Image (cartoon, grey):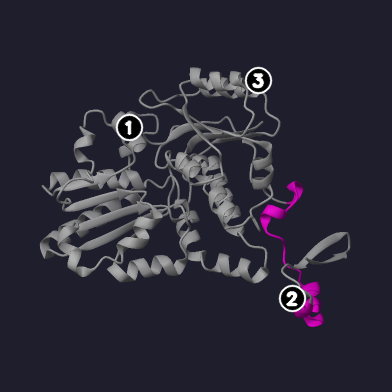
Amino acid sequence: MLVTWRAERLHLLDVGGHNVVAEYTYGKFYADALNPPPAARQFWPDADGPRFFARNPCLDFAVFGKELDQEWLYDLSLEQEGMVCELAYLADETFQQNGYRTAFIVGGPGTGKTSVLLNLLKYCHEQGYEAAITVTDALAEYIKASVPEIDFERFRFDAEAEEPPDIHLIDDPEYEHLADFGRLAVATEGAVPLLRVYAFDPLQLRFAPRDDDLAEWVSERDIAVFSLTECYRQKANVGEHVKEIADTIALSTPFLASKKVRDFQTERMGVTELSNGIEFPNPHGYLETYETATAQDVRKELARVKSRPLWRHWTPILAVFDSLADVPTAVRKLLEEANAFTVSSKIGRDWEDWMALSDVKGLEFQHVFVFLRRELYEQIEHGFRGSGQAAYHDRRLLRIPFSRAKDSLVTFVF
């Protein structure tokens, strides 16, 4: 590491192997001294910039649209209504021309990708098209709780069926599925749906694709891309903080060498904008972080939650436990008594543990409680740079549980 100390500030000049000493010339030093670039935000002191874990204990509340109603899942913004119309036109056109088309619905967390798919599914069946949808079992339970009058299982895609449906809607596909399907030979067209629609957040995939990857997938299959830019499914304070988290992660990399850092960020600028370039019209929202948490802190937050308007059709609380955190048994019992939806994971350790986090993709909760071990809290708080690719990708996916919160997000460190 090459550094210089001037005017009570330590400036990091370059990082790498022994070669950086020879390659770092006086001319480069002179230029850097004249215009030292600011450090990435994860390196800023608390007093000078935003932290990964923030506080904004706003207790204001205003009902937005149908957010307290059972049919909230089907509620659409004007942007989403327009997108459903465009996708419906694409479905009609595909059938009229008897061709094969694919569409991507991309957007950040809470932009309503699942809501668009469900409304498109409804349209397709009203038009007499054979349509099916692929969702996780957990998301299927949430949908059935939101629209109990519909026999939703009848519309789920059966992977063992001999023939695919005419229209196949896929919510949160796996990275490998997106990467592989574009290479299907034209000769297999008779065994695939006429129209496939994939809805996903590029930064919630197991591996964040590069801009070139996404462009290649789109060009190979002439894919129609629809982008969602409005998140009304999270309160503004919560959504904007989750966006800050996503932006902080976007500034982080698995690498230390400056060139690799620049290349990593540059290769994903477009994909990052697709996921993070969103606005939040739903006002207010509550954020709190307990850096030295106690059971009394959990009781206090549960009392706050119980004083708010709560969903009755679906559990309003998600509790995400870092299974390596020393969370007291009394705390776990409090969450059980509150009927919280619970996920436990050795966060950032291996594939199976990431899959536990991915189970809540697409689900919605009014309140999210995250319980972390101090070691992981400190690692996340100080950024991901130089973490190595495996740790980077696993920690990056912490945005999944954070982005499930609609009204409040609380982090407890034990």
Q: Position of residue 127 (x, y in %)?
A: 12, 48
Secondary element under disc 3, as helix, strand or loop, is helix
Count neighbours of disc 2 (C-alpha within 10 A) and say few if under 14, some if 14 to 19, many if 20 or more: few
- How far apart marks 3 and 1 lie (CA) works out to 32 Å
Q: Position of residue 75 (x, y in %)?
A: 32, 39
Numbered circles on residues, count: 3
Query: Which residue appears at 37% of the width and 49% of the height?
Result: 172
Distance from disc 1 to disc 2, alpha carbons, whole Å, reads 56 Å
Q: The residue under label 3 is which amino acid type?
A: Gln
Disc on res. 296: 3
Which of disc 1 and disc 3 is earlier in sequence?
A: 1
**Residue drawn 58% across the image and 53% down it:** 392
Assess whether residue 41 is covered by the magenta stretch.
Answer: yes
Region in magenta: 22-48
Give the left or right position of residue 6, taking residue 197 as reference: right
Residue 28 placement: quadrant:
bottom right
